[in-house]
Amino acid sequence: MVRPRRPLSGRGRLARGFLLIAVLTLTFATAGHYLGVVPHLDPSGLWRFLGVRVGSGGGGSSTGGDGLAPGAGSGGREDVPPGDGAGSGSGSLAVPSEDIRVLPGATFVWTVVYECCGHEESVVTTAGAGIVGLTRDQLVTELKDWTVTAFAPERAELERPERDAMCPAHSRCTLRLEGDDLMLYAGSLDDVPSVRLILIGPTGIKRGDLSQAEVDIFEAGKAFKDREDVLRYIEGLSD
């Protein structure tokens, strides 16, 4: 004899309904994932929705037992592509700086920066016997007055400031009348316009102190090889 089934209570029907929903949802999600119809569904989310406690497998936080970001617990960084880390054995390796040395015949560019006039003078030479084979650090130690601005085995560039002098072009001078004053300029009129004259200041000599012939000369401007030459000329004017 078949006993009639005992009708389920309201709580039992609710539990059976949740279980049926869970089974159907998991079946649909699994089939859809493999067929490419629906995105991947994390089953643990459904169980949590149904009130079932789900463990993390390790008993710790989802970020890892040590509190680090995902992937950090394994000793690696997710934002570093394979082969970029040290000791990976792949990829191009930087040449240690101590192995980069000056080659025979290397070009050296020596630049002096004259701060008084702002000009630069460069000279190009070939590496001498005392420089060939030096590393950058050794070159810095050997040439204490120079700053190495570029370094490669076949070419090096060095720079040195000159704070108390003008460049050769501005070491030459010009005397010229400006109004009633005889003014001194750094630079030669012979080099204008390639070299700009830089005003040094008045000499203290006035137009009235000069003869007409001297006025004509200084209105056009007179060039001198250096300041000493200017001083000797001015002393002659005062005699």
Image (tube, rainbow, N blue to C red):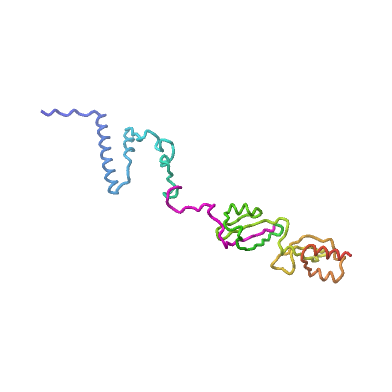
Q: How many numbered marks, from 0 up?
A: 0
**Residue at 15%, 28% in the rendered image:** 4
What x and y, as percent, mark residue 22? 28, 37
Q: Residue furthest left?
A: 1
Examine the residues drawn in magenta and state their main secondary structure. loop
113 over 13 or under it: above or below: below
- Image-based side of 60 in relation to 239, left or right: left
- Image-based side of 118 in relation to 218, left or right: left
- Residue 42's image quarter? top left
Frontmost residue, 195 versus 26: 195
What x and y, as percent, mark residue 29? 29, 43
Frontmost residue, 114 versus 122: 122
Frontmost residue, 238 versus 36: 238
Magenta residues span 86-114
- Residue 117's image quarter? bottom right
- Quarter holding the C terminus? bottom right
Q: Residue furthest right?
A: 239
Q: Residue furthest front?
A: 129
**Residue at 81%, 61% in the rendered image:** 202
Q: Is residue 17 magenta?
A: no
